[in-house]
Amino acid sequence: MKEHIEQEEIFSQILRAGRRTYFFDVRSTKAGDYYLTVTESKKFTHDDGSFHYQKHKIYIYKEDFNEFNEMLQAATEFILNEKGTEVISQRHQKDYKKNETESEDLATATSETSDFTDVSFEDI
């Protein structure tokens, strides 16, 4: 039976992002060339307090770097141009706090809608 031996990391960076962690690892092939692995590790907590990690890994080889970088750049620029830099999903977190601009926008929207007539449905 063959053992799977994970190649030694030559260069590594870690990006912690909430319950996700991204690992960027440079490894060496058997021939001595380098490639990149990007791993997403996501923590899941069970009802009993125990937890497990789910991992997804992609391998990117040197011959694909230019096109990969171009497509990644194009995709991220598209998202930022279409949706801006605000992380909309943060609004739905229980510890979310509005910043001053959002509070002012809400106050303006509230004052604009306060011109409605109060209607009692019992009159209808």
Image: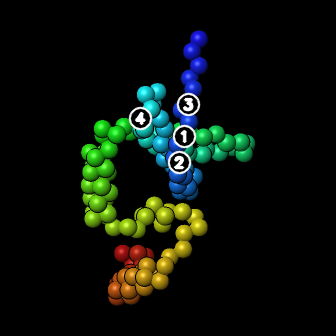
Please name the residue shown 30% across and 38% down the image. Answer: 63
Give the secondary structure at mark 2.
strand
Q: In the picture, which quadrant includes the C terminus?
A: bottom left
Separation (CA) of disc 2 from disc 1: 7 Å
Q: Residues within 10 Å of mark 2 (few under 14, many from 20)?
A: few
Mark sitting earlier along the chain (4/1): 1
Marks 4 and 2 sit apart, C-alpha to C-alpha, by 16 Å
Question: In the rendered image, which residue does mark 2 sit on?
Answer: 12
**Residue 12 vertical placement versus 54 (above, below):** below
Kindly report the distance in space between the C-alpha atoms of the residues bearing marks 4 and 1.
13 Å
In the depicted structure, whether residue 101 falls above or below residue 49 = below
Q: Nearer the viewer, mark 4 or mark 2?
A: 4
Q: Amino acid at mark 3?
A: Glu
Query: Which label belongs to residue 59?
Result: none
Q: Secondary structure at mark 1?
A: strand
Q: Earlier in the sequence, mark 4 or mark 2?
A: 2
Find disc 4 in the rendering and name its residue: 33
Q: Which class describes the residues within 10 Å of circle 1: few (<14), some (14-19), or many (20+)?
A: few
Location of the N terminus (image quadrant): top right
Element at label 4: loop
CB within 8 Å, label 2 to label 1: yes
